[in-house]
Amino acid sequence: AALLTACGSGTVGQTGSGDSQANSAGSKKLALIPGVQAEPFYISLQCGAQAEAKKLGYELTTQAPQKFDAAMQTQLVNALGSNPPAALLIAPTDDTAMLAPIQQVKARGAKIVEVDTSLKDTSVAASSVSSDNASGGKLAAQTMAKLAAGKSGSVLVLDTIAGTSTTAARAKGFEDELKNTPNLKSIGVQFTQNEPEQAAAKVTAALSSTPDLIGVFATNLNTGEGAATGLRNAGKVGAVNLIGFDASPSEVEGLKNGQYQALIAQDPASIGTQGVQQAVAAIEGKPVTRNLTAELHSITKADMDANSQYFYKQSC
Ligand code: T6T
C-alpha cells in the first residue's frame, strides 16, 4: 500500500492508530481509504474531502491501496487498529469481501461512510455517497443509441471486477436501457479485472467474433483506456463508437482526438465533500442522510469545452 500524496495540502500520512485521543469523544480525526492510489477519480474525491474536512475543523488522513484489490485494502483497514479515527470514509473494493474488516472498525467505535462504491450489506454504513451509477449506465445507452443514429449492430460492455458495486450498476443500467433500442443488441458484459490489457484483448476478440460490432461501453477509466487500445490496434477508431465512464486527463485527451465518442463524467469532488459532511454529522450526532448522489454528465467532443469543469484532477 502507498500513500496518496497528490493532493498537497491537508494531512496525508500514517493513520494515528496509537493515538489515545483517536477514538475518544470529540475526536476530530477522519480516515479516507479510496479504491486505488494515484488515480484521477479518487484524487479528485480526496481533494473534495480534504477541503471540506479543513472547513469543518477535522483532520483527514488518506491511505490508498496500490491496486483496486480487496486484500490490499483490508490491510489498510486493519491498520487503523484498535483506536480508529472518529469516522472512516471508504470505497469498498469488493461489496462482500470488505464487509468483515469494515464491520470491525465500526465495532471499535468509528462511524462508517461509503464513498463511491458500497457494500451489499446496507446495515453497516451510516451514509453512502455515490453517483447514481444505474442512471449513468442508462445515460451511456441513450448516448450509444444517439451515436448509432438508427444503424443496426452489436454492442460490447466491459465491466471491471465482479463485486465492484459501481461498475456492476453501470453495466446493468446500460443493458436494461439498451433493450429500448431494437437496432442495438448487447453481446453481453465481460470482466477485465480492471486491467487495460485485458480490456484491449476483449475488444480484439469481440471484433473478430462479431463483425457487426458497432459500439463498446467501458464502465470505468481502465476499461476505457484498454478498449481504446484494442480499437486502435484493429484500425477501428471512430468506426466502432466507444463510450467511456469518467473524465480523467487521458480520457479527455482521447475524446478530443476521436478515440472516444462520449464520456460519462462523475463529480468525484462532490462525493468527497458530501462524504465528509455526512461523517461529521454522524460523529456530532446530527441528522445523517442514508443515501446521497452526485451528478453525472454525458460529454461529447462537440460540447467538451463547455463541460471542462467536470474534468478530473491529478492534484488538488
Ligand atoms: O469509475 C471510478 C469509480 O467510480 C469506480 O468505482 C472504480 O473505477 C474508477 O475509480 C475509475 O477508475
Image (cartoon, grey):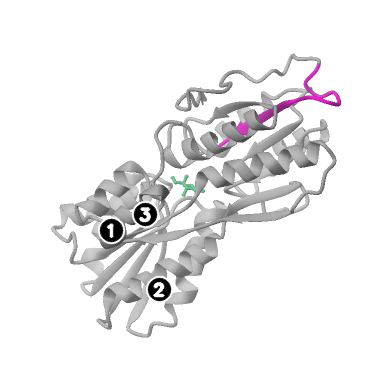
Residue 65 shown left or right of residue 211 in the figure: right
Image location of residue 195, percent across then percent down: 37, 44
Q: Quadrant of residue 214?
A: bottom left
Q: Nearer the viewer, residue 124 or 205?
A: 124
Q: Nearer the viewer, residue 127 or 228?
A: 127
Image location of residue 257, percent across then percent down: 19, 52
Extent of the magenta region: 21-34
Label 2 to label 1: alpha-carbon separation: 21 Å
Residue flagged by tag 2: what amino acid is it? Answer: Gln
Residue 140 lies in the magenta-colored region: no
Q: Residue at x 52, y 31 (%)?
A: 65
265 is higher (above) or lower (below) than 316: below
Q: Residues within 10 Å of mark 2 (few under 14, many from 20)?
A: some
Q: Residue at x 28, y 52 (%)?
A: 201
218 is higher (above) or lower (below) than 23: below
Q: Quadrant of residue 109?
A: top right
Which mark is nearer the camera, 2 or 1?
2
Label 1 to label 3: alpha-carbon separation: 29 Å
Residue 163 shown left or right of residue 125 in the figure: left
The answer to whether one can see residue 97 in this image is: no
User: Considering only order in the chain, which callout, 3 or 2, is on the residue closer to the N terminus?
Assistant: 2
Residue flagged by tag 1: what amino acid is it? Answer: Val
Residue flagged by tag 3: what amino acid is it? Answer: Asn
Q: Which residue is mark 1?
A: 203
Q: Residue at x 44, y 80 (%)?
A: 179
Q: Residues within 10 Å of mark 1 (few under 14, many from 20)?
A: many
Q: Which residue is mark 3?
A: 307
Q: Which residue is mark 2?
A: 142
Q: Secondary structure at mark 3?
A: helix
Image location of residue 298, percent across then percent down: 39, 62
User: Considering only order in the chain, which callout, 3 or 1, is on the residue closer to the N terminus?
Assistant: 1
